[in-house]
């Protein structure tokens, strides 16, 4: 899980502490942001030097006055256009909160769209408590679409990536220990970072999740954010080994980094 952050003054390189996932509380992993998010251009376009998810397609914002839930076949990802966005408690209601963009990792702020009602979008928020939702104006975001989703089966210690209804990647995972469990729920990727030390505790890549530990309200100065990341201890995969994060093999997290967009939904099954 994400903890401390230090932004460097020159490049957009970040130092972050992911000790809640599996390192020691004193170890720091240097990392850098990879790519960005689902944008008005296809994610994973040649304009970037690092692949960070090629799954999302763009579509006009608010082009149809319709009310539709977002189903399992595809998902809409809303990327914030400006430096901040107002989140409302209900359509045409009072402002609930303001969320800034980019986020703490330098990634454009995204939300997973739960319901599209044309001028208004109900979105899943990356805040406590897990599963929080709010409403944003469609004019404040750019919409993209992805057919990918990730399912984590805690009982079977297994992940499956779906493209629509078709399973395209499966593998084993490590989940949270009994005292610091990986909470079930519906989340989405909030950022992708690449640790400078590829042989460190977080492996080749780490995807931040929109959810948080139900036990660790803070950890080493951070909010206890969950993540899916690689590992330098593959022998622990298939067990309960973390403080709440999901560990997968470096091959699997590298595949995800190349194929899945920021904003891709992640469902952790009970």
Image (spheres, helix red, strand yellow):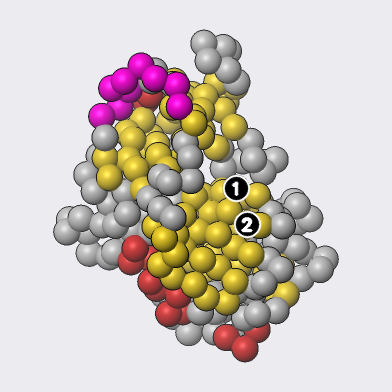
Q: Which residue is mark 2?
A: 268
Q: Please give the name of the residue rendered at 27% of the width and 65% of the height, measured from the top-left corner.
A: 50
Instruction: Determine whether label 2 and label 1 are within 8 Å by CB.
Output: yes
Residue 82 figure quarter: top left
For the view shown, which residue lies furthest in the front direction? 165
Seen in the picture, residue 183 relative to 141 is either above or below; the reply is: below
Q: Within the magenta stretch, is there residue 101?
A: no
Is residue 104 among the parts visible in the rendering?
A: no
Above or below 119: residue 158: below
**Quarter occupied by the N terminus:** bottom right
The span picked out in magenta is 60-68
- Position of the C terminus, as image quadrant, is bottom right
Circle 2: element type = strand
Query: x, y percentage for residue 199?
Result: 48, 84
Q: Residue at x 49, y 50 (%)?
A: 265
**Predominant SS along the magenta part:** loop
Report the number of numbered marks: 2
Which residue is painted at 32% across and 54% down in the image?
55
For mark 1, what is the residue? 186
Q: Is residue 64 above or below residue 4?
A: above
Can you give x and y, in whole percent of width and height, for residue 143 in the image?
A: 33, 35
Please identify the residue farthest to the left as the structure is shown: 46
Quick one: 2 or 167, which is closer to the camera? 167
Q: Residue at x 69, y 54 (%)?
A: 184
**Residue 80 visible in this rendered orientation of the protein:** yes
Tell me if residue 87 comes above or below residue 206 in the rendering.
above
Q: Nearer the viewer, residue 137 or 36?
A: 137
């Amino acid at each position: 899980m994400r903890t401390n952050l230090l932004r460097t003054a020159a490049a957009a390189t970040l130092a972050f502490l992911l000790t809640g996932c599996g390192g020691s509380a004193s170890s720091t992993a240097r990392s850098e942001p990879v790519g960005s998010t689902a944008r008005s251009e296809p994610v994973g376009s040649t304009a970037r030097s690092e692949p960070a998810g090629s799954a999302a397609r763009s579509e006009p914002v608010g082009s149809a006055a319709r009310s539709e839930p977002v189903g399992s076949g595809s998902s809409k990802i809303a990327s914030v256009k400006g430096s901040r966005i107002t989140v409302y408690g209900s359509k045409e209601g009072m402002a609930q909160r303001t969320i800034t963009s980019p986020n703490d990792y330098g990634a454009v702020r995204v939300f997973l769209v739960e319901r599209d009602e044309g001028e208004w979008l109900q979105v899943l928020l990356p805040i406590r408590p897990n599963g929080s939702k709010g409403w944003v104006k469609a004019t404040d975001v750019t919409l993209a679409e992805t057919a990918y989703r990730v399912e984590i089966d805690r009982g079977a210690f297994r992940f499956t990536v779906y493209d629509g209804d078709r399973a395209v990647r499966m593998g084993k995972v490590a989940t949270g220990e009994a005292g610091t469990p990986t909470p079930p729920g519906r989340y989405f990727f909030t950022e992708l970072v690449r640790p400078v030390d590829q042989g460190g505790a977080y492996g080749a890549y780490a995807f931040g999740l929109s959810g948080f530990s139900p036990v660790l309200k803070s950890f080493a100065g951070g909010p206890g954010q969950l993540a899916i990341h690689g590992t330098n201890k593959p022998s622990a995969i298939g067990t309960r080994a973390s403080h709440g994060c999901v560990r997968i093999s470096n091959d699997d997290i590298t595949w995800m980094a190349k194929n899945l967009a920021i904003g891709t939904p992640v469902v952790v099954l009970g």
